[in-house]
Image: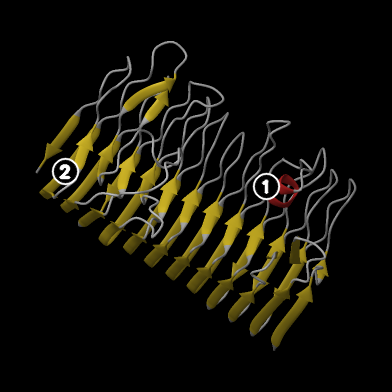
């Protein structure tokens, strides 16, 4: 039959652990499932389903099999659908989450398998986050997020979990997927016939060890109004690659209404170490379009090299500029506002010689560069500029 759950400020289903023993699992099987959370300011973070660990035992896994799943949170507070994450000084592993449904609709809610709650409450809790796997015909997220982050500024540790999504349609609006961690960012893999992201972000930021890959495979893939993918490194770990394959087209369309640039960002910042390389970007599609200041940017500001960009497309169109936005380091190494492809080396956080710029390799039958477009593999540091190769 049908399952309906409503809660206010406290979890409705709990299977937590505060000790050395592992938490139990929560499994739900139903014809449909409807979940609603409300917030009366008694607490800020609270989930509907809570299997997290604050001890050395592992958090519990959560498995849901249903027809239509609808989850609605309260926009006035951070109400999450599931927390199988970690907290405390020496936590166990975060729990894995698996959801299988015909349709999934998340509204102002989220999933956490890492130390997101503990991080914002200054409770440490970085360890190994759980994985999230979602299978559906249609998956929609509005003002929602899936987070497997694991970070601790005091004790720099943490390994993020993976996020895997398979659906015929994936639609993100003002939402995010994040697998950021100090040690190792998790993989993000999305397979969809149609993938549309609007004012949304996908990120896997690493610091000390190599990051996971972001891979999106589909027919139609569009990032609209400042939506972006970031797989960068802050220190000595190499950023993971970003791989996109679409059988119809890939499009990065316009900046956000507030001016944030959209596109792909795979940079080496060197904030906490200067040896990490920016990740490579590979795009394969019949048609690629970048407009309104959107960009592919694998610039390095460190001693690590800039990432290589490889594009195979029948036609490529680049045009337009972004204007009037506040500079954000994660999305704007340098002062560039033009749509385009950038694999530069700009220095600023180098230990010894700065890294070389990445190379750009484009194979296409048609390349159109309109007003404001750029392809730039230059250097403003002591690192060497990269090669640009365009072949039919």
Viewer-nearest residue: 320 or 147: 320
Mark 2 → mark 1, Cα distance in angstroms: 39 Å
Give residue 313's position: percent from left, percent from top.
Answer: 19, 51
Q: Earlier in the sequence, mark 2 or mark 1?
A: 1
Instruction: Answer with left or right where residue 373 lies relative to residue 137.
Output: left
Q: Which residue lies furthest to the top in this view?
A: 352
Left or right, 365 with respect to 52, comes to left
Q: Which residue lies furthest to the front in this view?
A: 324
Q: In which quadrant is the C terminus drawn?
A: top left
Q: What element carries label 1?
A: loop
As helix, strand or loop, the secondary structure at mark 2 comes to strand
- Identify which residue is drawn at 21% across, 27% down: 387
Q: Position of residue 120 (x, y in %)?
A: 71, 48
Q: In this view, does 369 lie to the left or right of 275?
A: left
Q: Residue 177 carries which label?
A: none
Q: Is residue 224 above or below residue 323?
A: below
Residue picked out by circle 2? 363
Query: 238 above or below 347?
Result: below
Contact, mark 2 vs mark 1 (Cβ under 8 Å): no
Give me the disc on residue 129.
1
């Amino acid at each position: 039959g049908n399952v309906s759950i409503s809660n206010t400020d406290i979890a409705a289903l709990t299977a937590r652990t505060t000790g050395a023993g592992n938490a139990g699992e929560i499994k739900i099987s139903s014809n449909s499932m409807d979940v609603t959370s409300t917030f009366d300011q008694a607490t800020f973070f609270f989930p509907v389903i809570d299997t997290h660990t604050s001890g050395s035992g592992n958090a519990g896994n959560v498995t849901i099999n249903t027809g239509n799943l609808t989850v609605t949170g309260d926009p006035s507070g951070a109400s999450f659908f599931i927390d199988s994450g970690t907290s405390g000084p020496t936590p166990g592993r975060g729990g894995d989450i698996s959801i299988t449904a015909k349709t999934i609709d998340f509204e102002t809610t989220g999933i956490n398998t890492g130390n997101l709650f503990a991080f914002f409450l200054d409770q440490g809790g970085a360890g190994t986050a759980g994985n999230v796997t979602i299978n559906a015909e249609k998956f929609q997220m509005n003002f929602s997020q899936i987070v497997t982050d694991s970070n601790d500024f005091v004790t720099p540790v943490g390994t993020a979990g993976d996020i895997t999504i398979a659906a015929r349609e994936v639609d993100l609006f003002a939402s995010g997927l994040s697998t950021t961690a100090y040690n190792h960012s998790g993989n993000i893999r999305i397979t969809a016939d149609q993938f549309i992201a609007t004012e949304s972000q996908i990120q896997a930021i690493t610091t000390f060890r190599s990051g996971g890959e972001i891979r999106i495979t589909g027919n139609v893939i569009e990032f609209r109004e400042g939506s972006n993918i970031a797989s960068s490194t802050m220190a000595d770990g190499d950023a993971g690659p970003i791989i996109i394959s679409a059988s119809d087209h890939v499009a990065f369309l316009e900046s956000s209404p507030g001016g944030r640039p959209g596109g792909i960002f795979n940079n080496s910042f060197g904030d906490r170490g200067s040896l990490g390389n920016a990740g490579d970007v590979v795009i394969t599609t019949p048609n690629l379009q970048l407009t309104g200041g959107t960009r592919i940017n694998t610039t390095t500001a460190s001693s690590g090299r800039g990432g290589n960009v490889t594009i195979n497309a029948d036609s490529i169109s680049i045009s337009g500029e972004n204007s009037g936005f506040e500079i954000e380091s994660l999305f704007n190494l340098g002062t560039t506002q033009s749509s385009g492809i950038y694999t530069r080396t700009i220095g600023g956080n180098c230990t010894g010689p700065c890294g070389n710029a990445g190379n750009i390799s484009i194979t296409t039958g048609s390349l159109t560069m309109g007003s404001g477009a750029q392809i730039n593999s230059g250097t403003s540091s002591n690192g060497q500029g990269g090669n640009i190769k365009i072949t039919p």
